[in-house]
Image (cartoon, rainbow, N blue to C red):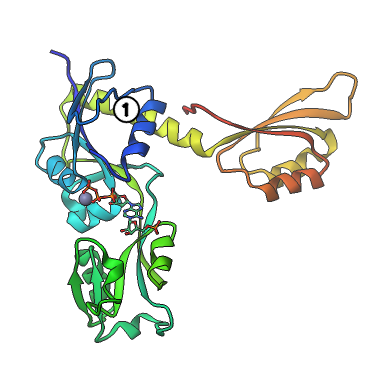
Amino acid sequence: MQTKLSLALQKSGRLSDGCIALFQSAGIKIRRSNNQLLVQDEDFGIDFIFARDDDIPGLVENGVCDLGIIGESLLQEYNIDAAKVMVKLGFAKCRLSLAHIRGTKYSSIDDLNDKSIATSHPKILSKFLNENNIKSKVVTMHGSVELAPQIGIADVICDLVSSGATLKENGLMEFMVIASSEAVLISRHGDLPDQKQILLDRLLLRIKGVLQARQSRCIMMHIDRSRLSELREVLPGSESPTILELQGMPQKVAVHVVSLEEVFWDTIEKLKEIGASSILVLPIEKMIF
Ligand code: PRT
Ligand code: ZN
C-alpha cells in the first residue's frame, strides 16, 4: 500500500486560497469538488482533509493528521505547544491588536488598568496582560468584536487586523500590536515513520523552494565594468554575479544577479545613479539550493 501523509486544510475561509496556490506552485494539484471533505492525491501521496480551522490543531495533536495549515494566531490561542511549526508560509498575514474608540485616549499599556477588553483571543491577551502586570477584565466574544465598545460591552478591543478597514469602519483606532500571525505548516511532536518522513522532507523542499522563489528576483542590466564594485553595495546578494561581455562595447558588461529579497523602486533608482541601463527585474518560478 502507498505510504501517504495526511494534511488538514481549512475547508473555506481566509487560508483556503493561499493553501491551494501554495500546493499548486509546489506541483501538487488539489482536485476538489465543492463540498468534498477528503481529497486523495495519489501522485505525490497526500490525503487532504478539509475542516474548520479551529479543529485542525486538535486533529494534528491527536495524530489523526500528520500535518495541518492554520494561522499562527489560532495555534497560540489553542495552545502553542500542541504542535510544532515546520515552516511559516508567508500568506494570511495579520496582527492581533488593541484598539479603542476614536477620540478616547490610550497612549500606553498602563491605560488598560481597570478597563474591560473584548477579544476572540482571550488566552493570548491574558498572557500579554499578565506579562505586563496589567489588571483588566477580559470579555470573550466569538465574532463581531469590533462592535463591543459601541454597545457598551467593553472599553477596548483586541482583535485580528489585516488592512485595518474594519476598525476604521467601526470608529476604532489601533494603538498597540500584541502579536503577529501568518499561515504556518504544523506537525505533531515526535518522529514520523521513515517512509512518511521521506515524503515530508520532499514536501518541505518543494514548499521552501516556492517560498524562496516568491520573494526573490532575477535582475539583469548593462553597466560599466568600472562600476561593478558599486553594484555590490546597491544590490544585496550580488557578491558573485554572472558577468557577460557585450559585443562591440568592451567597457560595458551585462550582469545577472539573483536577489533573495524583494527589489524596490529605490534600489532601481540607485542602479540608475551608478550608470546601469536596460534594467530587467524578473520573477523566479522555482528556487532550490
Ligand atoms: O470557518 P472557520 O472556523 O474555518 O474560519 P474562521 O472564520 O474561524 O477563520 P478565518 O477564515 O476568518 O481566518 C483564518 C485565519 O486567517 C485566522 O486564524 C488568522 O490567522 C488569519 N487572518 C488573516 C485573519 C485575518 N487576516 C483577518 N483580517 N483572520 C481574521 N481576520 C478578521 C478580523 O477578525 C476582523 O474581523 O478580519 C477583520 C479585519 O480585517 P481588516 O482587513 O478589515 O483589517
Ligand atoms: Zn475558525
Who is closer to the viewer here, 71 or 63?
71
Q: Residue at x 64, y 47 (%)?
A: 264
Q: Is residue 289 above or below residue 259?
A: above
How many labels were placed on the picture?
1
Who is closer to the viewer here, 77 or 115?
115
**Amino acid at pointer 1:** Leu
Residue beneath disc 1: 203
Residue 280, percent from left and from top: 70, 33
Q: Is residue 143 above or below residue 230?
A: below
Image quarter in which the N terminus is found: top left
Residue 33, percent from left and from top: 25, 25
Mark 1 Cβ inside 8 Å of ligand 1: no
Q: Residue at x 25, y 23 (%)?
A: 198
The secondary structure type at the circle numbered 1 is helix
Residue 287, percent from left and from top: 49, 28
Q: Residue at x 27, y 66 (%)?
A: 145
Q: Is residue 80 left or right of residue 265?
A: left
Q: In the figure, residue 242 lies in which quadrant?
A: top right
Who is closer to the viewer here, 111 or 272?
111
Residue 195, percent from left and from top: 19, 21
Give the crowd class for mark 1: few <14, some 14-19, many >=20 residues within 10 Å.
many
Q: In the figure, residue 163 lies in which quadrant?
A: bottom left
Q: Is residue 186 above or below residue 24?
A: below
Who is closer to the viewer here, 248 or 18?
18
Q: Give the farthest residue toward the top.
A: 1
Q: Is residue 77 left or right of residue 163?
A: left
Q: Is residue 82 above or below residue 203?
A: below
